[in-house]
Amino acid sequence: MTRINSAAVLGAGTMGAQIAAHLANAGIPVLLLDLDPKTAAAGLKRAQELKPDPFFTRNKAADLVSVGGFETDLPKVAACDWIIEAV
């Protein structure tokens, strides 16, 4: 079986941010991208405010999600083992 060491989620809306949360719950570092870093950060914040919280262990899992923008951070996707499009 192939091990997933990192993932990217393209789109930080309702679905994308929660997918990133669940990958982080599994211990996988995630790059969450949207149009710009502010939009990605806002999507992550919305996910963190949901009830029930999609982050099972908030401090550990949330630290595994990094945010960015398509224009500035898209080259980082090349280093990811799994890429999920959620736009």
Image (tube, rainbow, N blue to C red):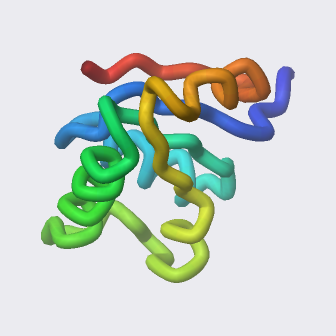
Q: In percent of the image, x 24 and y 36: which residue is there?
A: 15
Q: In percent of the image, x 76 and y 33: which residue is there?
A: 4
Q: Quadrant of the N terminus?
A: top right
Q: In percent of the image, x 52 and y 82: which residue is there?
A: 59
Foreground of the two, 28 or 78: 78
Where is residue 61 shown, x and y percent of the image? 55, 67
Q: Quadrant of residue 82?
A: top right
In the image, residue 43 sits, relative to residue 75, either above or below, namely: below
Q: Quadrant of residue 36?
A: top left
In the image, residue 56 sits, relative to residue 24, either above or below, namely: below
Q: Quadrant of the C terminus?
A: top left
Where is residue 40 shown, x and y percent of the image? 33, 46
Q: In percent of the image, x 43 and y 36: which residue is there?
A: 69
Foreground of the two, 5 or 78: 78
Residue at the far left: name it.
51
Residue at the far bottom: name it.
59
Where is residue 65 shown, x and y percent of the image? 54, 56
Position of 79 compared to 47: left or right? right
Foreground of the two, 85 or 3: 85
Q: Quadrant of residue 45?
A: bottom left
Position of 5 compared to 48: left or right? right
